[in-house]
Amino acid sequence: DKAGHKHFMSKEIFEQPTVLAECLTHYAPGDRVALPEDALDFAQTDRLILVACGTANYACLVAKYWFEQLAGLPCEVDIASEFRYRAPPVSEAATALFVSQSGETADTLAALRYASDKAARIISVVNVPQSSIARESDLALPILAGVEVGVASTKAFMNQLGVLANLAILAARQRGHIDAARETELLATLRAVPGLVNQALALEERIQKQTGKLAEARSVLFLGRGAMFPLALEGALKLKEISYIHAEGYASGELKHGPIALVDKTVPVIVMAPRDALFDKTVSNMQEVLARDGRVWLITDAEGAEIAGDGVWQTLIIPRIEPDLCAHALCRAGTVDRLSYSPAQRHRCGPAPQPGQVGDGGMS
Ligand code: F6R
């Protein structure tokens, strides 16, 4: 039953606020994370190895920022089909974590079996609790998203992030990186997310209008920094799967190392830039795109649009995201040298490509 939606995918996208709220309440009903702590000893873990495929792998890549920044836990993320055949060394003190909506993905299961007699513990984050991956883990954590019928993963991705965020907060506590007050604050930040997702869903009509123009593109780039980088990869994957338009996601800072050659007025570039500690850096990469006549679709919050919305093709204003969930932890650690943005930077980004150099068809 599609509950009045055209497709299951649409229904499942709109279920996200509800299923995420349920998942967050399950794993943190009060102001402490309530995960089985004996089975999750992050204090003794020397390395967290996260393994998955596709969208689940991108959830792991987002979580890497959280585990490293909140808990100071060294973290590796692998694609299951690479991990299983590469046969990497796995330390006895490692925690290996496998993320899978179905719990049956063959490469992820094989990767789990490879790690199972090597790592200290095998944890899985799954949507199907009776699945093979869940059964073969020391601890299986259900994401509680309900059945996902759509082939392209949506609500499962959201809830994978919900479980991984709780795990990162527990790891931060067990490793002495946060006190009780900070844990409460982080959980309050998480609890606000379903409401923000609701606000984002309310933008549907507006997004529909804007994407009409996107449909003419033959190729689309997604850019992001920090936790927005894996979201750029996920955005590109979804666009490919659903619209058959070629798309790639890049870390914003990588643009100048090759992919900038693809940018011209026919290539929409979706820049995901919440107003976090890395905002100025992302905006400076965006200027490089504008200098090459790229069509920038800036996704940011109201403050970000005010600062950087000048000269872009389209802007989508989304609710403000708490910096803890994107890149603020970096700023706190003092590792980001802040660039101050000035509109003049726009024209300091090298020459525009010559006509014909990278295709010069028009796009209105
Ligand atoms: C993309 C998508 C796939 C899955 C991948 C892993 O929208 O759905 O990339 O994420 O096939 O599947 P699971 O999570 O079942 O292991």
Image: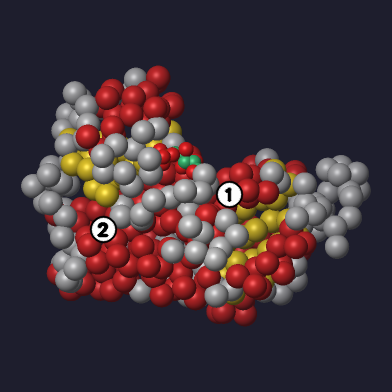
User: Given the current orientation, which residue lies at the most extreme left position?
Assistant: 38
> Image check: 238 left or right of 65?
right
Q: Earlier in the sequence, mark 1 or mark 2?
A: 2
Mark 1 C-beta to ligand 1 under 8 Å: yes
Camera-side residue of 121 and 29 = 29
In-front residue for pair 216/322: 216
Q: Amino acid at mark 1?
A: Lys
In the rendered image, residue 62, in percent from the top left (x then y), is placed at 41, 51
Picture quarter containing residue 290? bottom right
Q: CA distance from mark 1 to mark 2?
A: 25 Å
Left or right: 281 as drawn, with respect to 269: left
How far across and down, in percent of the image, does residue 253 sit?
A: 57, 51
Tell me the quadrant of the picture where the C terminus can be found: bottom right
Q: Is residue 117 left or right of residue 9?
A: left
Q: Percent x, y for residue 59?
A: 41, 49
Disc on res. 166: 2
Mark on residue 198?
none
> Residue shown at 57%/52% (left/top)?
235
Say which residue appears at 43% left-offset and 26% top-offset: 82
Q: Quadrant of residue 18?
A: bottom left
Q: Which residue is mark 1?
A: 238
